[in-house]
Image: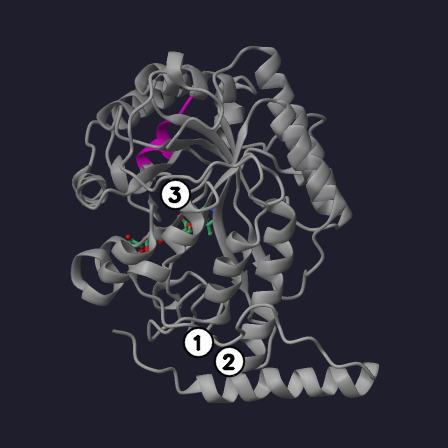
């Protein structure tokens, strides 16, 4: 059972003090926050999984394999809080396909079996990316061999877990406007060796290898109201329209949502984008939500408030879109987060801190799920994954 966070009393003081300052500045009594601003001590019956399910959402996290096997509290928290998981690294090319004729499925097998045993769904991440590529591939790829290499990899990996996966990140981060192409495509090893159609090919091969899974395009930098993010949203939309026009099998868009405390404006640009994505008949998943708070002072109380604001402001826009079906954080505890560095050993940008104590991120997630307008959204049962055949895949049909 998590212990009382010593910062709790400090945090509630801080929140109370903030309200008093607001009252003094505005002359009006700051209304008591609608939701508790003091982290709760979650349990199975107040879990993110259940709050999400009440609003037709799945909640889950990226999983690091070493702690999943060795850290009992980490594993307990995942079982208690999550209805969907995604491997942080073990299904990437460098880890799962370390040599030309050798695949290393041991960790991915463990994760999929763990999830199935605990009635948790699994996302696959990722089949085609410009990073985490083994040296044997980057040193031997050629225009003559690239399509075969990519096709065989997808067939081996997606085929192995066919009918067991909620979804696949088929292509990850293919848009990179800085490369200057008219279509906004990243000038990656895949584009150089296969051409822009590598994206279409990857999705078609993935559909053939795993017909039951929801095929997803996953991308970062689509979140705030900056010109940069708006331009990237338009390029992603152009690509999605191209795929749909060509009847390429794609089912969902993944918003990575790596937020920061310095970018706290989420609004009409994002809202319009999500509407356009829905109009293409695609589901939407928040796939890698976390908040980079490294620019904040060290004080956990201040960091928590800034992180919770970013999460609340972002999800207020995103969860107003009815076809958002899953929210995954990129880690459940900052103990194993990529955000944790020797220079910043105690980031607050995930639902639980390095001591597995809930942060205000947890409250913001829970309250954002609870605040989601529920009209027209039948409650989402958090039951086990039932593979869908394409013929019975209706939009949002994944339960
Ligand atoms: O497993 C090797 C280990 O054997 C070796 O000793 C060690 C030192 O070189 O490296 C280990 O691999 C590292 C791997 O994480 C596992 O810890 C890689 O070097 C390191 O690059 C890799 O970083 C991951 C990164 O993606 C690149 O794959 C991060 O953990 C992971 O959080 C991050 O996640 C990405 C998503 O996949 C895509 N969206 C952005 C997100 C954040 O960058």
Is residue 222 a member of the stretch shown in magenta? no
Q: Which residue is drawn at 37% across and 61% down?
A: 46
Disc 3 secondary structure class:
loop
Q: Residue at x 18, y 65 (%)?
A: 72
Dot placed on the residue nearer the N-terminal end, 3 or 2: 3
Q: Nearer the viewer, residue 145 or 316?
A: 316
Q: Is residue 347 above or below residue 18?
A: above
Is residue 250 visible in the rendered structure shown here? yes
Hey, which quadrant is residue 368 in on the image?
bottom right
Q: Which of 39 and 159 is in front in this view?
A: 39
Q: Which mark is residue 346?
A: 1
Q: Is residue 131 above or below residue 342?
A: above
Q: Start and end of the magenta stretch? A: 136-142
Q: Are marks 2 and 1 in contact (CB under 8 Å)?
A: yes
Dot placed on the residue nearer the N-terminal end, 1 or 3: 3
Image side of residue 171 versus residue 303, left or right: left
Is residue 140 a member of the stretch shown in magenta? yes
Hey, which quadrant is residue 203 in on the image?
top left
Q: Which quadrant, please, contains the C terminus?
A: top left
Image side of residue 180 versus residue 324, left or right: right
Callout 3: CB less than 8 Å from ligand 1: yes
Give the residue number, with chain letter if any, for mark 2: 300
Disc 1 secondary structure class:
loop
Dot placed on the residue nearer the N-terminal end, 2 or 1: 2
Q: Are marks 3 and 2 in contact (CB under 8 Å)?
A: no
Mark pair 1, 3: CA separation: 26 Å
- Crowdedness near tag 2: few (<14), some (14–19) or many (≥20) residues, C-alpha within 10 Å: some
- Crowdedness near tag 3: few (<14), some (14–19) or many (≥20) residues, C-alpha within 10 Å: few
Pinpoint residue 101: horizontal percent, then vertical percent: 20, 27
Give the residue number, with chain letter if any, for mark 3: 132
């Amino acid at each position: 059972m998590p212990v009382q966070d010593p910062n709790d009393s400090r945090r509630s003081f801080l929140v109370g003090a903030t309200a008093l300052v607001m009252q003094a500045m505005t002359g009006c009594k700051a209304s008591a926050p609608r939701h508790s601003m003091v982290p709760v001590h979650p349990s199975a019956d107040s879990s993110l999984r259940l709050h999400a399910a009440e609003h037709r959402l799945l909640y889950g996290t990226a999983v690091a394999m070493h702690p999943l096997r060795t850290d009992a509290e980490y594993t307990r928290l995942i079982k208690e809080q999550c209805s969907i998981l995604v491997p942080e690294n073990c299904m990437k090319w460098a880890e799962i396909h370390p040599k030309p004729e050798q695949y290393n499925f041991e960790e991915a097998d463990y994760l999929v079996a763990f999830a199935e045993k605990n009635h948790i769904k699994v996302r696959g991440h990722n089949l085609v990316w410009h990073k985490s590529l083994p040296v044997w591939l980057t040193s031997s790829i050629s225009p003559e061999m690239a399509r075969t290499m990519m096709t065989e990899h997808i067939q081996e990996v997606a085929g192995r877990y066919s009918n067991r996966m909620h979804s696949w990140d088929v292509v990850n981060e293919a848009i990179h406007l800085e490369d200057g192409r008219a279509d906004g495509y990243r000038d990656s090893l895949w584009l150089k060796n296969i051409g822009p159609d590598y994206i279409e090919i990857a999705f078609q091969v993935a559909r053939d290898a795993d017909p039951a899974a929801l095929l997803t395009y996953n991308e970062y930098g689509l979140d705030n109201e900056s010109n940069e993010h708006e331009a990237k949203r338009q390029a992603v939309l152009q690509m999605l329209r191209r795929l749909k026009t060509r009847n390429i099998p794609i089912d969902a868009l993944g918003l990575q949502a790596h937020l920061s405390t310095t970018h706290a404006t989420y609004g009409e640009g994002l809202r319009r984008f999500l509407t356009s994505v829905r109009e293409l008949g695609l589901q939407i998943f928040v796939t890698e939500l976390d908040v980079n708070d490294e620019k904040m002072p060290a004080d956990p109380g201040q960091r928590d408030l800034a992180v919770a604001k970013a999460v609340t402001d972002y999800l207020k826009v995103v969860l107003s879109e009815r076809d958002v079906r899953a929210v995954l954080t990129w880690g459940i505890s900052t103990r194993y987060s990529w955000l944790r560095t020797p220079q910043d050993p105690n980031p607050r940008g995930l639902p639980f801190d390095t001591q597995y104590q809930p942060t205000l991120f947890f409250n913001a997630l829970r309250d954002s799920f609870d605040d989601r307008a529920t009209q027209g959204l039948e409650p989402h049962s958090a039951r086990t994954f039932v593979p869908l055949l394409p013929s019975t895949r209706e939009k949002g049909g994944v339960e």
